[in-house]
Amino acid sequence: MNKITQELIDQIIAGLQEKKGHEIVVADFSDIEEAVCRAFVIATGNSPSHVQALADSVEEMARKHADARPSAIAGKNNAQWVAMDYGDVIVHIFLADARAFYDLEHLWADAPITEIPNID
């Protein structure tokens, strides 16, 4: 993973941790040619308002500290699953039931998964 992409991932994680997102994982697709991006960052929120707060925090941290803005954000209105497209990195913030249903981190069996410790 290149330095700019890693810095963006670090700021996304910081934004998620700042608002107490949990079960954060990074799926690294950098060695998978057919992947649509270099990485997924996936996290879980406790409620729709928490999911929205996590998305807002990610957006702010990425803008302030990595000079990055998402090209698209989907799902903020119902906040069951918010997807944020940063080009090389796509952020997915779920409610627990939706995350379990879609199980994104296991769709790409070839991708290494890094679990980020919860901050309580």
Image: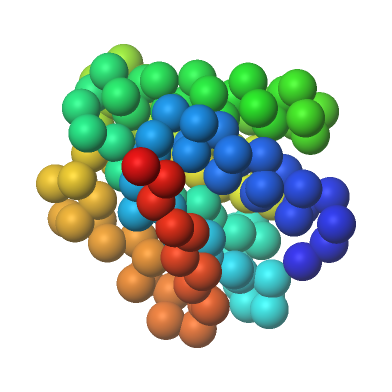
Q: For the point 44% across and 58% down, which residue is it?
A: 117
The figure's colour scheme reads: rainbow
Q: Is residue 41 visible?
A: yes
- Compared across the picture, whether 14 is left or right of 73 comes to right
Question: Closest to the observer: 79 or 20?
Answer: 20
Residue pushed farthest front? 120
- Tell me the quarter of the picture where residue 2 sits: bottom right
Residue pushed farthest right? 3
Q: For the point 85% across and 57% down, which residue is it?
A: 3
Quadrant in which the C terminus appears = top left
The image position of residue 89, as x and y in percent, is 63, 49
Quadrant in which the N terminus appears = bottom right
Q: For the point 19% across and 46% down, which residue is it?
A: 96
Instruction: Note whether 24 is above or below 18 in the view shown.
Output: below
Count every numbered label the image shows and give the total. 0
The image position of residue 40, as x and y in percent, is 53, 55
- Compared across the picture, whether 116 is left or right of 49 comes to right
- Tell me the quarter of the picture where residue 53 sits: top left
Q: Is residue 43 visible?
A: no
Instruction: Note whether 39 is above or below 74 in the view shown.
Output: below
The image position of residue 55, as x and y in percent, is 46, 27
- Compared across the picture, whether 108 is left or right of 65 comes to left
Instruction: Note whether 91 is above or below 77 in the view shown.
Output: below
The image position of residue 85, as x and y in percent, is 58, 38
Q: For the point 72% across and 44% down, which residue is it?
A: 8
- Tell me the quarter of the picture where residue 115 sits: bottom left
